[in-house]
Amino acid sequence: MGSTENSHTTDRRFGTLAVHAGAPHDPSTGAVIAPISLSTTFAQTSVGKPVGLYEYTRSANPNRDNFEQSVAALENAKYALAFSSGSATTAVVLQSLAAGSHIVSVSDVYGGTHRYFTKVAAAHGVHVTFSPSIELHVEDLIRPNETKLIWIETPSNPTLGLVDIQAVADIAHRHGILVVVDNTFMSPYVQNPLNNGADIVVHSVTKYINGHSDVCMGVAAFNSESLNERLSFLQNAIGAIPSPFDCWLAHRGLKTLHLRAREATKNATAVALALEASPHVLAVNYPGIDSHPHRAIAKKQHRDGMGGGMLSFRIKGGQKAAHDFCKFTKIFTLAESLGGVESLCEVPSSMTHAGIPKDQREAAGVFDDLVRMSCGIEDSEDLKADVLKALETVVKEAKINGYA
Ligand SMILES: *Cc1c(COP(=O)(O)O)cnc(C)c1O
């Protein structure tokens, strides 16, 4: 399923592919937008001879196929497979490994990925070693004949550190090991890991690809025929598939990804620079500005050196100030998740990363005063003003209440 038409991938650019890939007109009515195909089963004219391409919706569905073709085109992949969540995508990739397999992963993976690696994979005999500096140490952590996968998330969450995908892939491939990149934070518009040597790219579609905070879904994209055989078998066998309605919604969201990603980058850059200039801020993590320690990787690996819509910063005044800041913003909503049209903020140490022990958290830069922001596509002047006003209110409250 989900294989792209070559005419799409060879000569068309991102915006054109986003709008048209996997979006054929309905052949029976001419409808420009595909209908939502809710039928769970499809008629056969004689035994084993379905009328069209479809038999049963878990195995394949027109809306899922369309969405998969679109993502494959945007990730410059031959194949894409959609799942019921980003987490289900991770689970299926991990379940494709034989018992006794070993994985080397970056330390700062998404919390749910860390949970699956440490609490679920082990039950299937798959073991994971975490590395805080994978470019430097991956070679030493590879176990001959056992290591099957390298897992990268770049940028890292919530400190936005970058990994040089090609550098890690070069080492992995010398040992015959596959590289998976979780590209959720950048989206296919800003970064295409398969172009940097990755073998599989995964996304939580819930975030930028759908982009409207109203679908939970995941996707994996890759080029290998044998991976397609194995993973599409598991997609059907495990059955963690998205509904036709969610595929249709996510496909609609995807058509404006390039516009949203550009606007979110513009907004995050404006907010990052405003934060950096503020006397109430200790440090800003944003790969789109020159102060970022991995800026050179961003310039090499991201489209036009874009930084994406995510940033984090340390506020002066500790955890209390971080909590207050998220309470006082009026446009940024205090909530988990990211990648939607609306701006969100949260305090990772108390929310998304609360499950990680404090010493481990702080070793990774996740201090109690760190605030994570997902910049949406509102007007950048309004976002900047919202952030600066909230910073001032934090300082004023601290003075009034005597903890400044
Ligand atoms: C949200 C997220 C996931 C998990 O995706 P779900 O759709 O919530 O299951 C995985 N990786 C990253 C980087 C995420 O942000």
Image (tube, rainbow, N blue to C red):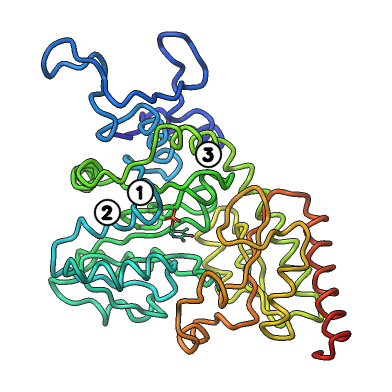
- Give the CA distance from mark 3 to mark 2: 23 Å
**Is the residue indicated by label 2 positioned so its CB lies within 8 Å of ligand 1?**
no
For disc 3, the marked residue is: 254
Q: Quadrant of residue 104?
A: bottom left
**Viewed as shown, does residue 131 lie left or right of 288?**
left
Crowd class of label 3 (few under 14; some 14 to 19; many from 20; radius 10 Å)? many
**Label 1 SS:** strand
The x and y percentages for residue 86 are 40, 53
Crowd class of label 1 (few under 14; some 14 to 19; many from 20; radius 10 Å)? many
Q: Quadrant of residue 163?
A: bottom left
Residue displayed at 62% across by 61% down: 335
Along the polypeptide, which appears first: circle 1 or circle 3?
A: 1
Which circle, 1 or 2, is nearer the viewer? 2
Three-letter code, disc 3: Leu
- Give the CA distance from mark 1 to mark 2: 10 Å
Along the polypeptide, which appears first: circle 1 or circle 2?
A: 2
In the drawing, what numbered circle is on residue 92?
Answer: 2
The x and y percentages for residue 33 are 51, 21
Q: Is residue 79 above or below residue 41?
A: below
The quarter in which the N terminus is drawn is top left
In the rendered image, the residue lying farthest to the front is 401
In the image, 100 versus 149, the foreground residue is: 100
- Give the CA distance from mark 1 to mark 3: 15 Å
For disc 1, the marked residue is: 220
The x and y percentages for residue 100 are 13, 70
**Viewed as shown, does residue 404 lie left or right of 272?**
right
**Label 3 SS:** helix
Residue displayed at 13% across by 65% down: 99
The x and y percentages for residue 224 are 24, 46
Residue displayed at 34% across by 78% down: 130
Q: Is residue 391 above or below residue 112?
A: below
